[in-house]
Amino acid sequence: QQQVKQSPQSLIVQKGGIPIINCAYENTAFDYFPWYQQFPGKGPALLIAIRPDVSEKKEGRFTISFNKSAKQFSLHIMDSQPGDSATYFCAAYRTYSGAGSYQLTFGKGTKLSVIP
Amino acid sequence: KAGVTQTPRYLIKTRGQQVTLSCSPISGHRSVSWYQQTPGQGLQFLFEYFSETQRNKGNFPGRFSGRQFSNSRSEMNVSTLELGDSALYLCASNWDQNYGYTFGSGTRLTVV
């Protein structure tokens, strides 16, 4: 059972555009939602993360929006650059002990291409 | 500060063989997790260790096992390799109160 659904699968934007990647989760036990960026040949790198008591978080050009009632969260990349071309993964995590703890549940990923 | 180190980077094994992968976490990180990444299934959780104890295990067959040593270094073992085990195996470490997992570059395993 896929607990984190991510869309779209791929995304092409022009330089300077604002790509938006969406994720939805099912398990209300999740209480930490990170986004990872992965370049070919590398492991995922933590980009930004949010807790459900916050509706929005910004770090540089990256913004997470979080809607707890809808169980959805999204990543916005402002002023996108060709160097942002990578695969982006949303994830969900339960930080306290119990079933399903201590594991990141990932979305399937979004391959972003930023065209110069 | 050194990152998460995984060795070897690449491996080619034959069906039926076994393989051991190694992970050295960031200094001071006591939690080590393993993930399998494939194009079809994406990133899937294998298991997590903290202070030499396995705290959680994903839905993988018993052929997949792991352990953690007293210095937090971890190994995972896959026995009786199958073609479907071909994947990128990623290790991640965490301080445990800081939830930002740091991933290594992975071990690319090819089973022929």
Image (cartoon, coloured by chain):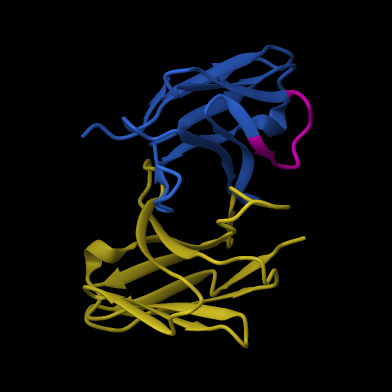
- Residue B9 image point, x, y percent: 41, 25
- The residue nearer to you, when weighing B69 against B10, is B69
Give the overall secondary structure of the magenta segment. Answer: loop
Q: Judge left or right: residue B109 versus residue B1.
A: right
Q: Residue at x 30, y 71 (%)?
A: A114
- The residue nearer to you, when weighing A32 against A22, is A32
- Residue B62 image point, x, y percent: 78, 26
* Among the 4 quarters of the image, the one containing residue B14: top right
| B86, above or below A73, in the image | above
- Residue A94 image point, x, y percent: 59, 58
- Which corner quadrant holds the C terminus of chain A? bottom left
Q: Is residue B60 magenta?
A: yes
- Residue B44 image point, x, y percent: 63, 47
Q: Which chain is yellow?
A: A
Would residue A114 be visible to someone looking at this image? yes
Report the span colored magenta. Answer: B55-63
Q: Which chain is blue?
A: B
